[in-house]
Image: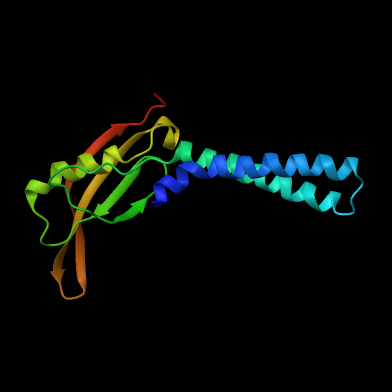
Amino acid sequence: MSFFELLENTPKIFGIVGIFLFICTIAAFILNFGFKFRIIGATIFSLLLSLSSWAFIQSYTEKVVVEDAKYLPIVYDNGFDLIIAKADDDFLKESIEPTLEQLSNNLRKGSRSGAEVKIKIRKLEKIKDDVSKPVVIGEVQKNIKMN
């Protein structure tokens, strides 16, 4: 069983365990067992795990991969309207557009309060020893809406 198959099955597994523990909790109260208050905690915890794993699956989206795009680390993200990715010195000009498209497609809808987000790719241009300046080599603006 792969990780993603296990991830899809966890809400069912925890839900079944929670229902079983709920039935055991009712039986423990009817039969007045001494562990009846401990089993309440286990029941609530398993049902909580079921709901939280279901919520995680709903929010999980796989990364979009665009052909000819390169992976670039995000070096600055203000969390609202600006993202800056760092390109290496050997970054090809042909990869700028696909990489910008990949970065913009991997932004979540509904995040950043529906802002106009600027995504920039920058290189560091060496001026002299131990001194460099950032140079923007590509930029795209994306409107993030809920729909």
Is residue 23 placed above or below 37 in the rendered structure? above
**Quarter assignment of residue 110:** top left
Q: Position of residue 28 (x, y in %)?
A: 85, 45
**Nearer to me, 110 or 119:** 110
Report the coloring of the rendering: rainbow
Residue at screen point 83% across, 41% down: 27
Q: Is residue 21 left or right of residue 107?
A: right
Q: Position of residue 24 (x, y in %)?
A: 78, 44
Q: Is residue 94 left or right of residue 122?
A: left
Residue at screen point 29% across, 50% down: 84
**Nearer to me, 64 or 10:** 10
**Nearer to me, 54 or 68:** 54
Q: Position of residue 48 (x, y in %)?
A: 65, 43
Q: Is residue 108 left or right of residue 47?
A: left
Furthest residue in direction bottom, as rendered: 129
Q: Position of residue 108 (x, y in %)?
A: 38, 37
Q: Please give the count of numbered marks on the rendered protein.
A: 0
Furthest residue in direction right, as rendered: 32
Residue at screen point 69% across, 39% down: 19
**Nearer to me, 57 or 84:** 57
Quick one: quadrant of the C terminus?
A: top left
Residue at screen point 26% across, 35% down: 141
Furthest residue in direction top, as rendered: 147
